Image (cartoon, helix red, strand yellow):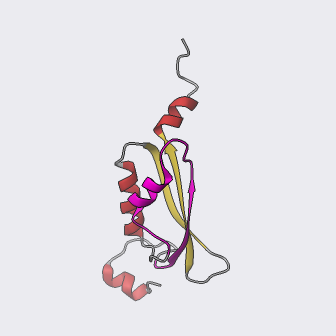
């Protein structure tokens, strides 16, 4: 865990409850066309890693830079049964599936 004193020393301006906790598992959602393995490789975060805001921001940016996604949401959820552990949740909205679901697209 990252203490408040360490956070003050580093100058972190905001805090999230999972900051400094170890990733236990990674949950993926929203994948229809793009490969989950590729997304996991781009995340650069593995189970056992200590989760930080900067890692989450870098991983989100890496996924968005692929230009495969309209939206990427990456966040931690505290594990209720395990102190100091967090489940990393990744939700993506793929560009290809968003185009298929768009009700405003002309059908002619």
Task: Assess whether residue 93 is covered by the magenta stretch.
Answer: no
Whole-percent x, y for residue 62 in the image: 36, 55
Q: Is 57 placed left or right of 1 in the picture?
A: left
Which residue corresponds to the image point at 45% horizontal and 59% vertical from the top-left?
40
Whole-percent x, y for residue 91 in the image: 54, 53
Q: Place residue 55 in its image quadrant.
A: bottom left
Which residue corresponds to the image point at 46% horizontal and 70% vertical from the top-left?
46
Whole-percent x, y for residue 68 in the image: 41, 42
Image: magenta residue range: 20-47
Q: Is 48 placed left or right of 81 in the picture?
A: left
Q: Is residue 62 above or below residue 52?
A: above
Whole-percent x, y for residue 107 in the image: 56, 16
Task: Assess whether residue 26 is covered by the magenta stretch.
Answer: yes
Q: Residue furthest top?
A: 108
In which quadrant is the C terminus drawn? top right
Q: Place residue 2 in its image quadrant.
A: bottom left
Which is nearer the eye, 78 or 29? 29
Q: Is residue 88 above or below residue 3?
A: above
């Amino acid at each position: 865990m990252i203490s408040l004193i360490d956070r003050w020393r580093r100058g972190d301006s905001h805090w999230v409850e999972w900051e400094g906790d170890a990733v236990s598992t990674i949950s993926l959602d929203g994948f229809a066309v793009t490969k989950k393995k590729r997304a996991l490789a781009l995340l650069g975060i593995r189970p056992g890693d200590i989760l930080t805001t900067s890692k989450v921001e870098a991983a989100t940016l890496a996924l968005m830079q692929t230009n495969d996604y309209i939206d990427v949401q990456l966040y931690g959820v505290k594990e209720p049964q395990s102190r100091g552990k967090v489940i990393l949740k990744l939700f993506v909205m793929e560009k290809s599936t968003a185009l298929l679901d768009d009700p405003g697209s002309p059908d002619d």
